[in-house]
Amino acid sequence: MVLSVQNLSMRFELPNGAAIQALKDVSLQLEKGALLSVLGPSGCGKTTLLNILAGFLMPTEGRVTLNGHPVEGPAPERGMVFQQGALFEWMSVRRNVDFGPRMKGMAEAERNRITDHLLETVGLQDFKDKAVYELSGGMQQRVALARCLANDPDVVLMDEPLGALDALTREKMQGLVLKLWKETGKTVVLITHSVEEALLLGERLIVMAPRPGRIFREYRLPFAERGVTSDLRSVKKSEGFAEKRSEILEMIWGMEEEIMGRKDRAA
């Protein structure tokens, strides 16, 4: 399985006749089981890129293919986990997770087997009959992950899925993301604003620069693999983590200062 992004550009035309070049000539290739984190300052096109991978937007130039087939719209082989769970709050946890298999017409016994396994994996088996609105934010994101995986996508796309959580819950969820990545063998693309999270949850990490949005730097990192078998706090103290964190922070701060300088000159 290969997810291929080829010379991707995205230009938004504005009502006043102006335009925003959100992405310019972005290319990358992900093999099956890759774990990619995408980082960059506000306005660098991270979410635009993810929406194109999901099929929610069509690029103005270039193309995306999955297994050699062009991505031309949303499809079950690409699952999305949003910053807010986007769950059906009037349904139970179980009914949320098995929604995709039900829509496919899957037999009840197989549907229940998949749902029970995923709820056990994300630690929500005891909450399967609860309504979504009764759960905490962290629990709701676990439901969102399980619902995505219930469709058995080739690629899991995650748009700031942990951004709204408190620090302790976020750390637990980071560990769960690594566990699910390793156990399922899915290809995962995760957007984040947190340098620390990008380092922990990316065996590959790309830093994007803005206007136009483009890949500025790419890293191959050991920390995600370490996090599968080790406590994440110890991973943060491991060799090279602090140095990479400082290097990338300085890079992004420099971009932010340049953006602010442009705004000041425009004013």
Image (cartoon, rainbow, N blue to C red):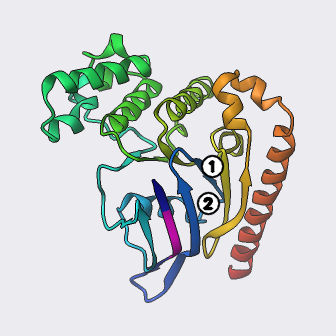
At horizontal 35% and vertical 62% (from top left) the residue drawn is: 56
Is disc 1 in contact with disc 2, using a CB cutoff of under 8 Å?
Answer: yes
Taking 81 as reference, is 258 above or below it? below
The residue closer to the viewer here, 177 or 226, is 226
Image x and y of residue 10, in percent? 48, 76
**Residue 3 visible somewhere in the drawing:** yes
Q: Residues within 10 Å of mark 2 (few under 14, many from 20)?
A: some
Image x and y of residue 155, in percent? 43, 48
Name the mark on residue 24: none
At horizontal 66% and vertical 44% (from top left) the residue drawn is: 203
* Residue 111 magenta: no
Residue assigned mark 1: 193
In 3D space, how far apart are the residues under numbered discs 1 and 2 (Cα atoms)? 8 Å
Relative placement, left or right, of 246 versus 73 is right
First to last magenta residue range:
4-8
Taking 153 as reference, is 92 above or below it? above
- Image quarter of residue 221: top right
Image x and y of residue 174, in percent? 58, 31
Helix, strand or loop for disc 2: loop
The residue closer to the viewer here, 236 or 116, is 116
